[in-house]
Amino acid sequence: MTDGHDGRDRPLLVGVDIGGSKIAVLVVDRDERVLAREVASTAAGAPDRAVDEIDAVVASALTAAGATIEDVAAVGVGVPGRVDPLTGAVSLAVNLGWSDLPLGGRLEARFGRPCLVENDVRAAALGLHRRRVVGDIDDLAYLAVGTGVSAGVVLHGRLHRGARGLAGEIGHLVVESAGARCACGQTGCLETLVSGSAIARLAREALDAGRSSGMTAPSPTAIDVYQAAEAGDRVAIEIVDSVGRRLAWAVHLLVMAYDVERVVLGGGVSHAGETFAQPIRRELDRMREASALAREQLTPDIVELLPPAADAGAWGAVIIAGAAPPGLGAGHGREEVGHVRDP
């Protein structure tokens, strides 16, 4: 690799997608050719260990790519929480237990390279748009269903963060006031009914209540539930159908609120494929039959299931990294990325 002094001489971009139990890293060149992909189980949820954990996975990926950090123009990082893209600080990441963590600045000090930090789902939405994964569409939402539930929204080709950087946080919309307590402190949030952990909890509750089911594991996971539903297990089918109905309502909400042309479904739970998607489509069909307005807004192609291998979060972080002009530090992305406080 070259030893130049600006980003043009350092042709590589690194994208880091942080989850509650793993970190995924992509190393790509400026032509978006993947040179290395690394996924590692981590304890990144511990804020005092976050930089060390990220550094270790990035170093491993760079070694696999035959490169060093000196070959890197910029690093993009996606975090599941509220992020200030101007400073790179994570003000609140509920599912990671992070609060007021100056992640971007610490990573820049470690790497010696520009590090841009963004909410993971919003980064993924921007990546889907910039790479035209769903075609020539400038108004789209990416609905991620995993440990948490969130949406990233692109309007007129620009990432829409909202006045406080929280646009699309529909996982914390209260939909059942007497429901389970959410990590955010409210009760009955959408996330408590359709996330991976919520699906596992619903299965445990059904088994604890003595429901007859082939799910015999003491702690079934969301994957177990979808596999059981595919095999015809009645309890699992009830849970999957309930999740699908509520996610269809979430799709409806996104379309009505933002008038997007497409809602892309992703996240860990979506890896169940058609078993995940079919109940959503059935409920959308029902809504179309009941309402002329729904028929107009919820077009037959309104939802698209993202393939599990799409690496939307890591690719989104790569796109964020590519927005860093040479020589600038944390948070200094190009204006068209659409920061909360654009100049």
Image: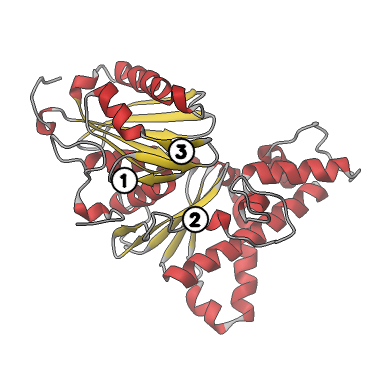
Residue position for label 2: 169
Hey, which quadrant is residue 29 in on the image?
top left
Q: CA distance from mark 1 to mark 2?
A: 16 Å
Q: CA distance from mark 2 to mark 3?
A: 24 Å
Residue 215: % across, % down: 80, 38
Q: In front of the other: label 3 or label 1?
A: 1
Q: Nearer the viewer, residue 186 or 44?
A: 186
Q: In front of the other: label 2 or label 3?
A: 2
Mark 3 residue element: helix
Residue position for label 1: 85
Quarter that holds the C terminus: bottom left
Residue 298: % across, % down: 51, 72
On the rendered structure, is 214 left or right of 113?
Answer: right
Residue 229: % across, % down: 74, 47
Q: Amino acid at mark 3?
A: Ala
How many residues crowd around disc 1 within 10 Å: few (fewer than 14), some, or many (20 or more)?
Answer: many
* 332 to 3, vertically: above or below: below
Residue under the point 19% across and 20% down: 70
On the rendered structure, is 255 left or right of 194?
Answer: left
Quarter that holds the N terminus: top left
Residue position for label 3: 309
Residue 80 in view (yes/no)? no
Mark 2 residue element: loop
